Image: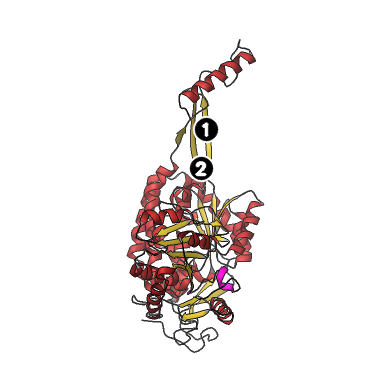
Amino acid sequence: MAPDLIADPETDPTATYAVDPALVRRLARRVVAGPRAEQHTSHTPLTGAPLATLPLSTAADVVMAVDAARTAQRSWARTPMELRERIFLRYHDLVLERQVQLLDTVQLESGKTRLQAFEEVADVALVARHYARSAAAYLRPRRRGGLFPVLTQSVEHHHPRGVVGIVSPWNYPLSLAITDAIPALMAGNAVVLRPDLQASLTALQGVQLLTEAGLPESVLQVVLGDGPTVGQAVVDLADYVCFTGSTATGRRVATSVASRLTGFSLELGGKNSMYVAEDASLDKAVEGAVRACFSSAGQLCISVERLLVHESVADEFTRRFVAAVKAMRLGADLAYGVDMGSLVSAAQLARVTAHVDDARAKGARVLTGGRPRPDLGPYFYEPTVLEGVSAAMDLRDDETFGPVVAIYRVQTDEEAVRFANDTDYGLNAAVYTRDVARGRRIAAGIQAGTVNVNEGYAAAWGSVAAPMGGMKQSGMGRRHGAEGILKYTESQNVTAQYLLPVAPPRGVSDETYARLLTGALRALKAMGRR
């Protein structure tokens, strides 16, 4: 059932909290904050009711958290890989066993539906299992070709960086707080996590389950507070920074971290396209487009905001798609069966409304949706489909980050690729066609870090052994796969030289040595040596 609506929840001090205060007090103990810390009360976007009151950290608290993490990291780095593996496999099981409580909290903090909250639970389980069983292989020492065959033997090692700072956003409160921490911890680092204030309760629940799974508490520190103060302190002090958020903030993070010559990875904004080719199964394309455009009410960095449809099927696709969108079930229920939930805040509602109103005022046609739904909750907005969108309208090129998509007609695959690439971003894309080989060829021309064929976003995102991240203004670095854990390490080349020095031996002139080495280099090339 949906949480009870109240008259004026953001100003009513007697309102009932949506989460048990006793649970909140237990979770609050994990926050690094002083005994007289300022308190912050969050509200659920589903109804506006107060959700939880948690202590706020200061910049000084971040210093304490980083110092404690640095001390703990030394012993954690010596923990055998087999023990780390057991901890995260146990965590995998705990996340699945405790999913009901996690689902409730994800929904209450983010406003998304039950099924879309389950995506986060499944994602965390997938990533925990993958790195528990693959980290040893990713990190093992590897022999590399040396200068001289046999005589020179090189081994590549990977060492933890130390303390990893993770600054995570509000839209995926469980996934983005936890899944970036898992490979960092498996690589032997400690982590200082600063989740968004709107996502803090979910993050703390995820952290508490890690403790139950056997992770030493001091290895994962949590600080809470705003971005400019607490988030910036994490950025300023960590040995590596992982940031997910807007492109504008990502640029500032990159500038700050780069000034210290410290490593970082960024996953930022997107203006993602789905192309429906003329041979696509329209039933599958329509179903996939509904999910790709409106999952988490469009508050998903890899959500589709541009539908590029081949003109030969555009009329029929549009008819079916609009009908499917009109049939979507909106609601605030903490139960399965709802298709789309709420936006997260008044700011998000204002941005979505402004984009749609601007497009409508400049001549775009709203095929369905286009209005808030305060009867459902304070921040609900109808899933919206437009056509006739031009470059003069904000939503053509700016990320809306809401349940809004525009349909554009194209005549060829090449035109679709050009349109998909006509953006500063390059995060995700999708291609629907019955010919998968053709879909792969089209995908190769799209400048995006992930491209799905016959799926909107979940196939590439859920393939956690493969890299995920953005091109152009959508970020730097990758999560998932080998890159998702190796970025948290420093590579080291240890090379041993045997028998002969890398210099003229005694009694051999420099000229003779150079002549002999020239002959050896030519011979090695002829032998096919790399």
Q: Nearer the viewer, residue 133 or 222?
A: 133
Q: Position of residue 83 (x, y in %)?
A: 38, 48
- Tell me which label, 2 or 1, sits earlier in the chain: 2
Looking at the image, which is closer to me, 523 or 137?
523
Q: Is residue 262 left or right of residue 214?
A: right
Evaluate whether residue 431 shows in this view: yes
Residue with the mark numbered 1: 494
Q: Is residue 185 left or right of residue 243?
A: left
Residue range (magenta): 388-405
Examine the structure image and report whether residue 158 is included in the region drawn in magenta. Answer: no
Q: Residue furthest top?
A: 507
Q: Which residue bears the numbered disc 2?
A: 159
In which quadrant is the N terminus drawn?
bottom left
Task: Report crowding for label 1: few under 14, some 14 to 19, many 20 or more residues within 10 A (C-alpha).
Answer: few
Residue 501 position (above or below residue 46): above
Q: Amino acid at mark 2?
A: His
